[in-house]
Image (spheres, rainbow, N blue to C red):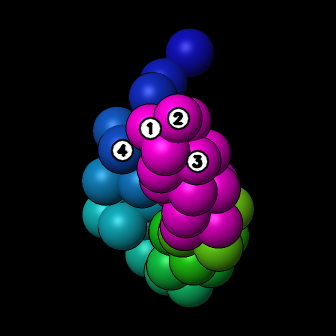
Amino acid sequence: MQTLPKWMLNQLSNRQNPLLPYVMATLVMLVSIPLAWLAQRLSEAGSDN
């Protein structure tokens, strides 16, 4: 089992499908940015008390 960064580095050196790591990186960012924003909003709401 590989971690996501190691998998991406291995895929970048793989010339068969060069776009796959970029697609995966975009999907990871699209998922992680809203989750980080939500966590920030929830932590701000908890500190207002």
The verdict on residue 36 being magenta is: yes
- Considering only vertical position in the picture, is 12 above or below 42? below
Q: Earlier in the sequence, mark 3 or mark 4?
A: 4
- Considering only vertical position in the picture, is 43 above or below 25? above
* Residue neighbourhood size for the residue with mark 1, other residues' Cα within 10 Å, grouped as few (<14), some (14–19), many (≥20): few
Label 4 – label 2 distance at C-alpha: 39 Å
Chief secondary structure of the magenta portion: helix
Instruction: Give the residue pinned by disc 3.
Output: 45
Mark drawn on residue 5: 4
Q: Earlier in the sequence, mark 4 or mark 2?
A: 4
Q: Position of residue 7 (x, y in %)?
A: 45, 43
Residue at 48 percent across and 24 percent down: it is 2
Mark drawn on residue 49: 2
User: Magenta stretch?
Assistant: 33-49
The three-letter code of the residue at mark 3 reads Ala
The three-letter code of the residue at mark 1 reads Ser
Q: Earlier in the sequence, mark 1 or mark 4?
A: 4
